[in-house]
Image: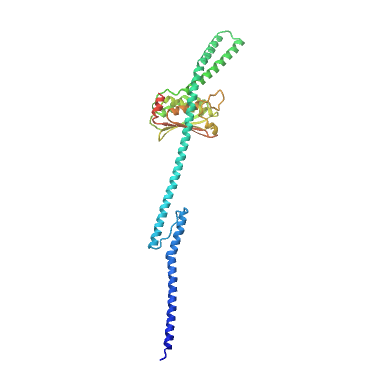
Amino acid sequence: MRLDPYDEARRSSALQLIFFSALGIILTSIVTAVAVRRMVHNPVRAMITSAQALARGDHSVRVREMTRDELGLLAHAFNQMSRDLEKAHSELLEWAQTLEHRVQQKTDELERAQEQILQVEKLASLGRLAAVVAHEINNPLSSVVTYAKIMLRRLAGKEESPESAQAQQYLESIASEASRCGEIVAQLLSFARQRGGEFVPTNLGTVVEKSVFLVHHKLEMAGVTMEKELADLPPIKADSGQLQQALMALLYNACEAMENGGTIMVRTRAWEGGEVLEVEDNGPGMPTDVAARAFEPFFTTKNATSGVGLGLAVVYGIVRRHGGRVELKTAPGQGCRFTIYLSSTPPESMQEGAS
């Protein structure tokens, strides 16, 4: 028998087997490569890209969770870590902003406290000086006024002549100027007096009513309208006389600032630490540089015959002795608003200093 056809068929089958085996291997490799790329390489690459973005600070990055195998669990863990980091970063930013705000707030409080300490030191030094000066010149001034009035009485009983009329004019000028100096001395003594008074339960509304009653004639003559918004407040521990002195000084100050008339508003209200007394006018207001020195002793923008610049300094000293604070808000053409914050119960040291 001839075996050539069988050998040919065997070779053909072998070639076909080799071809299809190779084709199967190639197809299997392609399918495997595609599957590995889709199921392993792409997710891993996406996770690497997301991890790099997370490292750059993008905490909102997430990866797709497509499977439930190990890579799916890894993607879920990555997303959970990213959410935790985003939350922690957000909390850190919030805390940083809160800390920055508190640091700024405390810095402002320290600056205000430092300004108040400097102001208190100025008041204390100038108060001692004022007391010495007032004591030294008060008696001579009283003598000048007394002798001038005695001479005026003696001249009044004599025949009137040009010389006596001129002498009376001179004596009246002496008595007037000496009396004005006496008023300045009284202001100095009031400024220098750091003690005195009694801290008792005081109704702020009553203090306002008494003060307004005492100055209403001056307000009427100046064409100034008085308005009040008084809240129903419980008594606070304070010296009513000193508070009345401070309020009257503010009212006089506002009245003198409004030469062509205007309106003064007095308000009382509560705040978390006690009560607030507010005096606001619609006068010309103050420039920034003047407002910054408003509470300095002997600083004034008035002429020489109107005062010596102690009114607001006295107000500041009284408020400080009550353990409170006074704030001024003003601008040119927008009036002035003085806000006095009074504690319901001043510190014991303040009360002892005023007793």
Which quarter of the figure has residue 158? Answer: top right
Q: Residue at x 40, y 54 (%)?
A: 81
- Could you say which is closer to the camera, residue 212 or residue 327? 327
Where residue 213 sits in the image (x, y, percent)? Answer: 45, 25
Which quarter of the figure has residue 194? Answer: top left
Farthest-out residue, right: 162
Figure colour scheme: rainbow
- Could you say which is closer to the camera, residue 52 or residue 72? 52
Residue 110 visible here: yes
Q: Residue at x 44, y 76 (%)?
A: 22
Above or below, 203 relative to 155: below
* Quadrant that contains the N terminus: bottom left
Which quarter of the figure has residue 197? Answer: top left
Above or below, 75 relative to 235: below
Farthest-out residue, bottom: 1
Residue 187 visible here: no
- Could you say which is closer to the camera, residue 296 or residue 269? 296
Above or below, 334 relative to 14: above
Q: Residue at x 42, y 72 (%)?
A: 28
Where residue 348 sits in the image (x, y, percent)? Answer: 38, 28
Count of number-bearing discs: 0
- Could you say which is closer to the camera, residue 316 or residue 277? 316
Where residue 85 sits in the image (x, y, percent)? Answer: 42, 52
Q: Residue at x 45, y 44 (%)?
A: 97
Where residue 294 sits in the image (x, y, percent)? Answer: 52, 30
* Quadrant that contains the C terminus: top left
